[in-house]
Image (spheres, grey):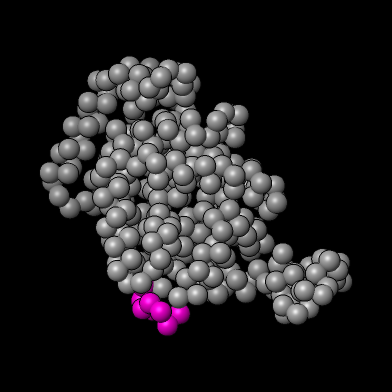
Amino acid sequence: EEAIAYFPTPLRERFQPFMSEHRLSREIIATQVTNSLANRMGASFALRMNEDTGASPGEVARAYSIAREVFDARGFWRRIEALDNKVSSELQLQAMLAMWRLLRQATRWLLNLEGRRLDIRQMVDRLAPGLKLVARAIRRDLPAEEVESLHQQMQPYTEGGFPAALAEQTAMLDRLFPALDVVETAARRRTDVTRVARVFFGLADRLELAWLRRQVEGLVVIGRWHALSRAGLRDELFSQHNRLVECVLRSAGRKRDPVGAWLAENEAQVRELTKMLTNMKDHGEMDYATLSVAVRALGELGAEPRP
């Protein structure tokens, strides 16, 4: 597809069957991906990913290509760019930044995935179908608080001239990153992705993990080390969330309400965590130390008691 997109439309219409056999196809693909990576993510993106994960430039490019495909970023960009001179450029930029954040997180997730599996076609086939199912599940199962938040995020776009479907898609981008973990967990356990999604988002709702994630995302970043600290805290939060999903599926996965059954089994620990989060909400402004304590407490939930 990269090699085909390189050529002008009249040539594609006449010679598309032969383009994949072009003797410079590898060089064309490398140029196309490099240009997309720099233009869409920024000139320093590959360097930042290397510093964060130790990945080579080639691995970063492959991870980015996978992320771009599974979230249909190119289709999204085309729809946003089609609004040129119809909506404000500021709104278009905000929408582009929402996709940029998602692709940055997804690229980092792929590079940190165990075994660093970066076969583009294999990973797209593994992730894309499940992501579509999870995206529908998110829309269907959002808790009331998140539905209100989604509508608030959509409002500037709809009022600014975005079609309703595109406004919703843009507002949903910040909620799609966790879907990668849902799909990977389902694939690893060879179970139904919608079942894993119900557990994942059920835990997020009942343990107020969406609120906790927003607090982490809202931390003020001053310089490189703050950025790394926030990214590490966010990764740890997702890691603990996924661990809890595994706990629920393992111990109560076949029950009608697996999340409710598991929370009842761990009632004392859940009560302590809920009390802590309530106190934090009452306290007001969050900082790195406070949120680190919350994430660490989450890590103790459902863990085996220490000897």
Farthest bottom residue in view: 85
Across and down, in percent, residue 297 comes to 30, 34
Does 177 sit above or below residue 171? above
Q: Quadrant of the C terminus?
A: top left
Of the pair 38 and 291, the residue shown nearer to us: 38
Across and down, in percent, residue 257 comes to 38, 22
Q: Residue at x 18, y 32 (%)?
A: 275
Residue 32: in magenta span: no
Q: Residue at x 34, y 42 (%)?
A: 142
Q: Quadrant of the N terminus?
A: bottom right
Horizontally, is 91 left or right of 16 in the view? left
Does 51 sit above or below residue 281? below
Horizontally, is 1 left or right of 21 in the view? left
Does 195 sit above or below residue 54? above
Residue 88: in magenta span: yes
- Name which quarter of the figure residue 33 lies in: bottom right
Horizontally, is 29 left or right of 71 in the view? right
Q: Residue at x 59, y 48 (%)?
A: 128
Of the pair 123 and 57, the residue shown nearer to us: 123
**Res 30 visible:** no
- Name which quarter of the figure residue 143 lies in: top left
Of the pair 93 and 227, the residue shown nearer to us: 93
Magenta stretch, main secondary structure, is loop
Across and down, in percent, residue 246 comes to 47, 28
Of the pair 224 and 259, the residue shown nearer to us: 259
Horizontally, is 250 left or right of 159 in the view? right
- Name which quarter of the figure residue 66 lies in: bottom right
Q: Residue at x 27, y 24 (%)?
A: 269
The magenta region covers 84-91
Across and down, in percent, residue 295 comes to 32, 40
**Res 275 visible:** yes
